[in-house]
Structures are given as structure tokens and as C-alpha cells.
Image (cartoon, grey):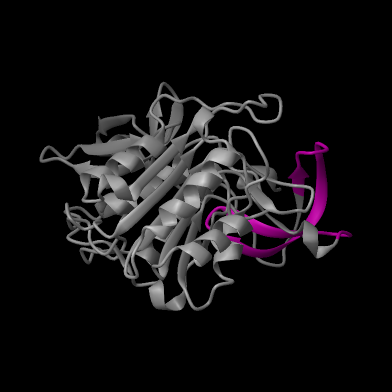
Amino acid sequence: MKAQVKTGFGKTWVFMVGVLEWKDANSFASFEKKDRLDNKILKFFRENGTPENQILYISDKQATTKAVREAFVPFLKQAKKDDILLFYYCGHGYKNDKKQVCFANYQGADWSAEEIVKTVNENFAGNTAFFTADCCNSGGLSLEAQKYKSKNFVALNSVVPKDVSTGNWTFSNALLYGLQGQSFVDTDNDGAITLNELANYIDQEMAIVEGQKSANYIPTSMKNWVVASNVTKKKNSRIGERVLVNYEEQDWLGFITSVNKEGLFKVRFYSYTNDETDWVEASRLKPFVCKKDFAVGASVKVYYKDDDKWYPAKILKKFSCLHYIHYEGFGNEWDEWVSQENIK
């Protein structure tokens, strides 16, 4: 994963589990399969030098806990000392009765974040592994990865361990943009995307677009690890800027991906798959700004959706459009990140 070139992923092993339907439909609602992002990530590695025998993708009805466990260890044991692992999961995440973060396979027993990272530590010969997940509670992988200080274990996850996540592909899109070497992820415009830049980009995307705080763990020695090199430098400083475009008196959020010779801006809009684009005149673009901003220490009220009530709280810290709050009269275990819509 050191360079975004056709042969740059020859030492990468890719283990992917994508579950968008479940046997227990009452507990886990299905997701739309059209334009699923796990397929696009899979295609990226196949087209960029990862040998087919170093890719294992298990999806939907085939992804039972039994099948995933039986495939995981033999796959890991094939790797060599200098090889790199990318682990990816998309679907539903949850906490079991033991409060462990688990990933919901099509059917079967709990498959926990603790088990996943431990299995890699015990069976993968390489020292470097990336644990990515797009689901509720996915940040459990970040907590587990940091337990192994002697390894280069990195975790990039859609949400902090105790929160639910979006049903959109915003995280997976951001991850793929980084792997592809998209210029708008290269925030310092130096021709390379580092792990730190990618993590920060994902963090901003999830905060602004979904109102959620992503989770990541990157060892200090890995922060400048290059995810993609030879990145095309931005020809216009506005590339990557998040903007609002008005259509029939309604503002739609997107971001600028390119500018043409006529001065039109190509905007990619946020949606389920983030695939919709349009060329827009500069006069129709409005800069995105967070609607609400409260100072650290401010007293506020926060909407708690489980019981449909507003509770008094205090701002502890901020990130982008999110505020981390403490509910007055409750223990610290209730502290959480809240979106701007749920605070006043």
C-alpha cells in the first residue's frame, strides 16, 4: 500500500466481508445492493496489482460466521513476513451481551472485533495490517488494534465504538477516494496521500455529511505512511471544497472535484453512493458552514432520540460540526458526540 500504481499492491492481502442481507431479518434490516461500495473496493485492488490468490471476498448468504472463521485463518497463514493485510467489513455492527463490539454475519455466532484483530496477530506473518469497517460500533476495531504495540496495526472505522452509523456509503467512499489517490484527499497538495491525511478526510466527511464521529488508530510511526503517491496536484484551490448548490429552492450538499476551462465547477453530491455529479456555475455555489457552533464549556440542551427528550448538557470539546457533550446529572459513560441537529 505504499504507492498508487498498477503494481503497487502486489504484497497486499485483502480479506473482505460484505453483508447486506441477513437470515434474521427482524434483527438486522437489509441494505440496498445496487452500486455497493465493497464491490468497487474489491475491483480497485484487482486492477492495481493484487494477485487473485491474495484476495478473499465473502458476501451475503455465503458470509456465515462458520464460513468466515473457516476461511480467515488459512487465508492469513499464506502471507509472508513483509506482506500487508487489508481487512474490510461492511454491514451491521452491534454490541453483544458481554458488551463486545461484533460484526453481524449472515447467520451464526458473534464475530467480535477482539477476535478479528487477535486472529490476525496470531496468524498473519506480516507486521502491518489495516482494519477498516463501515458499520455501527465499528470503532471497536480501533480499540483492539492499539493493544498490539509491537505491530503496525492501523484502524480506520466509520464511527466511534458506542455509536450507531449511517446507512450510506460515505465512509467506504472516502476510503476508496484515498486508495485511488484522489487529489481532494491530498490536503497539503504535495502529490502524496498519507494515512494521517486519509484519516482526517474520513473524519471530516463523517462529521459533516453524516453527523457522526469516525474512529481511527494510527501508530505514530505510521502517520506519514503513504497510501497513494503520484497524486495529481490540484489545479484549482477550490477542488475538494464542500459547497451547497440550489435546485428548485433547496440546497444540496456536495464537493468540487474539478474545474473546466469555461469556469464551470464539477460538483459530486452526497447521496447513498455519492455518484451524482453536475457542472455548476460559480454563482450557484455557496460555501458550506456548520449551522451551529457552541463554545467549550457552554451549557446546552441535547436531544436524546431513544426517549424523545431534550436534556441539559455541557460542551466538553468540538470537532468540525460535532460537539462532545456531558449530560448533567449522569455519569461520564453517557458522554457522546452529537450532531448539530441534536443540540440547542
Residues 81 and 251: in front is 81
Residues 285 and 277: in front is 277
Residues 154 and 234: in front is 154
Q: Position of residue 198 (x, y in %)?
A: 38, 59
Measuring 34% from the left and 32% from the top, which residue is drawn there?
Answer: 275
Whether residue 74 is visible to the viewer of this picture, yes or no, is: yes
Residue that protrudes farthest toward the top in the picture:
248
Q: Quadrant of residue 100?
A: bottom right
Q: Position of residue 134 (x, y in %)?
A: 51, 45
Q: Position of residue 10 (x, y in %)?
A: 24, 57
In this view, 98 is above or below 142: above
Measuring 80% from the left and 64% from the top, which residue is drawn there?
Answer: 332
In this view, 267 is above or below 316: above
Q: Position of residue 13 (x, y in %)?
A: 35, 54
Part of the protein shown in magenta? 302-330
Query: In the rendered view, does 47 fall on the left or right side of 68?
Result: left
Query: In the rendered view, does 88 fall on the left or right side of 29?
Result: left
Whether residue 241 is visible to the viewer of this picture, yes or no, is: no
Q: Quadrant of the N terminus?
A: bottom left
Q: Decide whether the magenta segment is chiefly helix, strand or loop.
A: strand
Measuring 52% from the left and 45% from the top, which residue is drawn there?
Answer: 70
Measuring 46% from the left and 46% from the top, which residue is drawn there?
Answer: 171
Residues 124 and 190: in front is 124
